[in-house]
Image: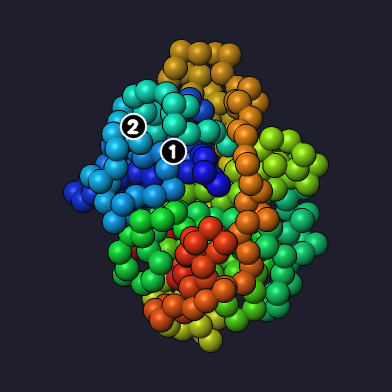
Amino acid sequence: MLLPWQAAIKQTFADSTGCGAVVISENWVVTAAHCDILQIGNVVIAGTSNIPQGDFSQLDDKYKFNVVKRIAHPNYDDTNINHDVALFRVDRSLYSIAQPIKIATAAEQAVADQDFANTWVAGADSRGNLIASGWGDTVTNGNSPKELQVVKLGGIPDDQCNNTMTDNDSFVCADTNIAGLIKDVCAGDSGGPIIWQNPSSIADTDKGIRLVGVTSNGAKCSDKNDNADNPAYQLNGQYSQLSTYRTWIETTIQAEDSNPSFSLSAIPTPTLSQDPFVVVEDRPKSSGSSGGSMPIWGLGLLSLIGFMRQRR
């Protein structure tokens, strides 16, 4: 798999994706706190990039894990979506089928922030230094795709972010890095990963890939696609910045697992056969007919078009 830490959470009343999630340890995934609701069920899938017909019931049971504990951040605020992060524990080892990803440290996030400041150019092409992924809609009100979707984005400095959040330390901001091309995530991608590459660690087996955030909030798909020339409908993407929550994640897992020695720094380093930032391209090779451009990447994965996370 290109992204072996990718996970998803089943809807309660349907066999399709409700939210994304990310494998961060043997028994835990991280997701968005707004995914801790009745409509989001207690089955996580991991270890695959293909959900046949987008239908969880078609998957082999080896890819399915039962959720036994759900913990939203205690300061999560569903009015402004601050602290939008949660942990779900599953019933058996995720390492049987998936690999974890390292969460960015505060020092690494500072490097990423400087990268964003150096490369983001509002209204023009910018460097694609982030990748988001999930099984969310590929067009407004569309069906869940079967193949994992990936899209390369540009990181935006906090002071230039067009968003609804007020705490700059709690989110990462991102949007399309190609002027005039709408690229982003959509309904069903909440809680999924957005990754960045540490340039000092590219030679490592994980290619220096770091989890900097999980998909949180932004404009609705229909607003962003149908009003491309109206700035009022072009909110940038907002992702819960996980370096801010490393201590909470560690102490929560330590307490829940009765394992005071647990450390995110001791998580096994994944081994990647391909570099996602080489494989995933900036520009589309072909176009779709709904919701704007729909790039097809080298692996045959569609980009995510439109934008709707928490608000449905």
Decide: marks 2, 1 in contact (CB < 8 A)? yes
- Secondary structure beneath dot 2 equals helix
Please provide percent x and percent y for residue 20: 42, 48
Name the residue: 58% across, 36% down: 101
Name the residue: 70% across, 42% down: 207
- Residue 141 visible in the snapshot: yes
Front in this rendered view, residue 237 or 132: 132
Label 2: how many Cα within 10 Å (few below 14, some 14–19, many 20+): few
Please provide percent x and percent y for residue 167: 59, 52
Amino acid type, residue under disc 1 in the picture: Gly
* Label ID, residue 62: 2
Name the residue: 73% across, 36% down: 204
User: What is the number of callouts on the image?
Assistant: 2
Determine which residue is flagged by label 1.
Answer: 47
**Distance from Cα at disc 2 to Cα at disc 1:** 9 Å
Q: Is residue 90 above or below residue 222?
A: above
- Secondary structure beneath dot 1 equals loop
Front in this rendered view, residue 245 or 205: 205
Name the residue: 48% across, 73% down: 294
- Residue 82 visible in the snapshot: no
Label 1: how many Cα within 10 Å (few below 14, some 14–19, many 20+): many
Please provide percent x and percent y for residue 100: 54, 33
Quadrant housing residue 33: top left
Please provide percent x and percent y for residue 220: 41, 70
* Label ID, residue 234: none
Q: Is residue 120 above or below residue 69?
A: below
Q: Looking at the rendering, in which quadrant would you find the C terminus?
A: bottom left
Q: Earlier in the sequence, mark 2 or mark 1?
A: 1
Amino acid type, residue under disc 2 in the picture: Lys
